[in-house]
Image: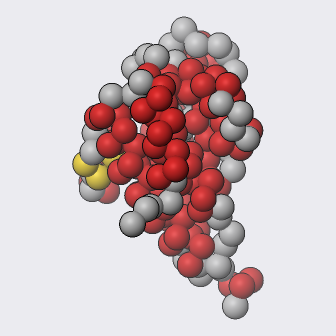
């Protein structure tokens, strides 16, 4: 049985992603689809197909680099393949809870904001934060992993996690 987004796996292979990256993308997809389903179940609209596709492709740029620039490279690859802009933006904005222009410049990247804006972008970014290699980490491990970041970045991670958690509760407007 195929899972949502499986039709995008061939693009990872064709780009030259190693099997470990591909398996990581599958696990991130599973987590992202679960989050999307929980939010949809609470009466909110999420494009689960876009989430699944974005989660599968989020690390396609690792076929070129494993550095921080892999998200930018992924966006370039996705555009060269003719994918729609919403999918390309998921790939570009998936690192951490997003990176602001000054933070990106500190990594030697172009000084442009890459903060997840849409619900689908946020779901994929957070799902990626919950997967280390091919292992889904606990909430405690997630919070512990944030200790290495400065306060503003740590707060952005937590705000993203909290926002998505709040969206899992039923929407009173949909009752």
Q: Which colour style is shown?
A: secondary structure
Looking at the image, which is closer to me, 150 or 164? Answer: 164
Image coordinates for residue 93, horizontal then vertical, percent: 60, 35
Q: Residue furthest bottom?
A: 175
The quadrant the N terminus occupies is bottom left
- Name the residue at 71% across, 33% down: 82
Residue 71 in the image: above or below residue 47 = above
Residue 101 in the image: above or below residue 116 = above
The quadrant the C terminus occupies is bottom right
Image coordinates for residue 70, horizontal then vertical, percent: 49, 22
- Badge count: 0
Where on the picture, by quarter, is residue 54?
top right
- Name the residue at 60% across, 73% down: 40
Image coordinates for residue 148, horizontal then vertical, percent: 33, 30
Image position of 57 (left or right of 140)? right
- Name the residue at 42% across, 24% down: 16
Image coordinates for residue 145, horizontal then vertical, percent: 31, 39
Looking at the image, which is closer to me, 109 or 62? Answer: 62
Looking at the image, which is closer to me, 140 or 152? Answer: 140
- Name the residue at 27% across, 45% down: 134
Image position of 58 (left or right of 23)? right
Where on the picture, by quarter, is residue 105?
top right
The answer to whether residue 88 is visible is yes
Residue 39 in the image: above or below residue 85 = below
Looking at the image, which is closer to me, 80 or 51? Answer: 80
Image position of 22 (left or right of 12)? left
Q: Residue furthest top?
A: 108
The answer to whether residue 144 is visible is no
């Amino acid at each position: 049985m195929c899972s949502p987004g499986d039709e995008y796996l061939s693009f990872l292979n064709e780009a030259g992603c190693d099997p470990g990256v591909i398996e990581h993308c599958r696990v991130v997809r599973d987590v992202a689809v679960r989050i999307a389903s929980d939010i949809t179940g609470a009466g909110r609209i999420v494009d689960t197909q876009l989430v699944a596709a974005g989660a599968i492709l989020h690390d396609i740029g690792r076929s070129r680099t494993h550095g921080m620039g892999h998200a930018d490279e992924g966006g370039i690859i996705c555009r060269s393949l003719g994918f729609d802009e919403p999918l390309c933006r998921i790939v570009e904005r998936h690192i951490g809870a997003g990176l602001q222009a000054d933070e990106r410049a500190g990594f030697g990247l172009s000084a442009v904001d890459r903060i997840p804006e849409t619900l689908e972008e946020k779901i994929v970014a957070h799902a990626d934060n919950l997967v280390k290699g091919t292992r889904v980490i606990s909430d405690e491990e997630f919070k512990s992993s944030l200790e290495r970041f400065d306060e503003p970045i740590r707060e952005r991670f937590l705000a993203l996690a909290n926002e998505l958690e709040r969206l899992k509760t039923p929407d009173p407007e949909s009752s």
